[in-house]
Image: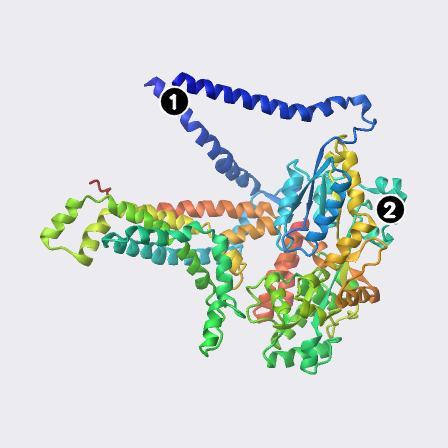
Amino acid sequence: MLLKGSKSLMMLALVMVLILSACSGTKDTPAAADKPGETKAEPPKDEPVTLRVFSTFGGTDAGRAAFQKVLDHFTAKHPNVTIDNDVMSANDNGFRTKVNTDMNSGNEPDLLFYFVGADAEGFVKAGKVIPMNELLDADAEWKNGFKPDALKLVQQKDGNIYAIPLTGFYEGLFVNKAIFEKHQLELPTDWARLKTAVKTLASKGITPISAPFDQSHYLIENSILSAAGPEGHHKGLLNGIDPNWGKGLAGLKELYDLGAFPKDAATIDLNMAMNYYSEGLSAMIIEGSWAINSMSEQVRNTTTVLPFPAISGGVGSGKDIIGGFSTGFYMAKKTYEDTKKKDAAVALLKHLTSPESIKIIAESNGGTPAANVEVTGLPQVALDGFKMAADAPTINAPIDTQVSQETFTTIRENIQPVLKGSKTPEQALEEAKKVEENNKK
Amino acid sequence: MKGDKKYIFLFLLPAAIMMTTFVYYPFFKSFYLSFFRTTGFFDKKYVGLDNYERLFSDGLLGAATLHTLEIMLYVIIFQVGLALVLAVMVDSIRWGKTFFRTVFFFPIVISGAAISLLFVLIYNFQFGLLNGALESLGFDKVLWLSENSALKSVAIPTVWHYVGFYFILFLTAMSKIPSDFYEAAKLEGITGIKKTLYLTIPLILSDIKVVLTLAITGTLKVFDFVWILTRGQNQTEVLGTYMYKKALIDLNFGYGSTIAVYIVAFGVILSIVTNRLLKKEEITY
């Protein structure tokens, strides 16, 4: 019996070994055909390739289904390509860690959808991704499909383009017009009107502006821009603190004292803040263009978007906005140098960033398309947003792309103390400045 | 004997490899990183003891330590205490033991993140379960996660989640007590609360010690409840969330690692102190 048992075990092991070697055999054969001298020769068309595409078109992202559709279009045309659609939600910071770990541990995705600027500097400098300039120049049709501005905005500091943009974004003050009409309020187009609206709404038991204190990115970016203007906004903290930054935070405190923010603003996150707005519990929210699709249809239909008004005493115009093209597709150097993957990956990149694909994505996430396409079927608020962006004298990259993450966190952590009055805006910014200096030492 | 040693070594090897890879290597790597200033993954610079200097002057870390200690207090009193009370009660009933054991153990099976999300909906100010109930009874809404009460509110699910685990440990310990002890007690006329206080608890003291050590060191790992319920706002930052923020949001792995080293040192000191305080000779039946 025992002998029989061990015999069958051995048979099983043998079968496993055979299966395994058969599997690796099929994979190895085409590689063996790729002799070093013949790399330029066309690889067989039906050679199976698996490409991993990492993006944030996942979770509750408005573009999730559209992105999958675009990928499906590609695999329908290229049945030999299998796409591993690796996604993570952009709602939290987890995906940054994931991307950085992958890039640092030799596990680069073939195509990566990620931020440009400070966020990407590490892996760009480390040579993990390829500059796209030559690829773009070699394919005029592809290159001419983009708005020149969009390609300019995704340049890294060294002047090269590493990421090909899909859609851009803008941030603004989203306003539920229905609530304003009901309470006979004027839209908050300037600081005085915003204050009146906040006062009136708060007295009627409606949360004026839905915003979390911890994830206060948009509050900070917009208030500082509207107090310091584009120039002051770009100064950063290393060469002294622009006094107008303090005015921006003081403006937020002014609103807080009038009862502008939810009672539980300290502990809610962005999702919950959006939830309050979407349910009609609050009249305004400071958000980005991507938020349009997370609103309930009823609220979306009565929503418009305005620039955050200029804070009185500051130097902002009240027309400048935060926005731009801050994300795009990177291609790993490893993939580009892999003769088996290169052509498929380049084809996929061109497909994902073609005007047709950009149109599909823009229609789903409400972002400004990077290509010259007419986006149809958008709700009125998205059109209002495009108009706001077109009318804006300047479109500015948010502060957190210009200072280190830790500095920005320090400002965020201080929002609650500043609003409650236990710290002055100047103290908060002084703290942030120290962190920034330590980070850039 | 010599042959035995070979097998002992052989069988311990896999565990040793796992421990080295997933516990000791990361720990020493963290220790190494704590001497660097890092910006993300690609940039690091040796800064000597700068991070440790910062550690000792960091007000936020001090606050996080205090919050952790406060949760620890709740855990010791309510988690371990409640588990002990429940175990004594379940141990003394005649029927339905299995039922109660399952019911009390059940929360352990649910992940902390799921329980936290549940409590987000219970505590929510606008449309939470508690405020909904209060409103329908004609009371004003209460801000459950306010600056004064947030830590206590977070402690409730934290405590509840693991009561069942210690409950089972106590129950198992009690079932090991030989029944002749109880028979003797019965003959002497010792019953009820006296039996529990003078017989059961002294006999499972070594298990109580283990549970206390587990509970205390476990509190240092609290993360999910705080992170999901309050994001560390309103005086609820604990060591776990603070380390996460520094390392993975600010991408300052150097300082994050320093905090990690601090947490380990803090944990070791705490468990030594606990063992000292509870030192008593072991009981063998």
Question: Which residue is identified by label 2?
Answer: A143
The chain letter under disc 2 is A
Question: Which residue is identified by label 1?
Answer: B7
Question: Which residue is at the front of the view, A325 or B112?
Answer: B112
| B17 lies above or below A74 | above
Q: Quadrant of the N terminus of chain A?
A: top left
Q: Residue furthest bottom?
A: A184
> Residue B232 got which mark?
none
| Lateral position of residue A234 relative to residue B221, left or right | right
The image quadrant of residue A34 is top right
The image quadrant of residue A423 is bottom right
x and y percent of residue A121 in the render?
Answer: 72, 45
Q: CA distance from mark 2 to mark 1?
A: 66 Å
Disc 1: CA contacts within 10 A as few (<14), some (14-19) or many (>=20): few
x and y percent of residue A57 in the render?
Answer: 68, 51
Q: What's the residue at 50%, 37% (across, down)?
A: B22
Which type of secondary structure does the marked residue at label 1 adopt?
A: helix
- Residue type of the residue flagged with mark 1: Tyr
Which type of secondary structure does the marked residue at label 2 adopt?
A: helix
- Residue type of the residue flagged with mark 2: Lys
Q: What's the residue at 59%, 24% (across, down)?
A: A19
| Lateral position of residue A39 relative to residue A297, left or right | right
The chain letter under disc 1 is B
Q: What's the residue at 61%, 22% (across, down)?
A: A21
x and y percent of residue A3 in the render?
Answer: 41, 16
- The nearer-to-camera label among 2 and 1 is 2
x and y percent of residue A232 in the render?
Answer: 76, 63
Question: Which residue is at the front of the view, B170 or B148?
Answer: B170
Q: What's the residue at 83%, 53% (across, down)?
A: A371
Q: Residue furthest left?
A: B187
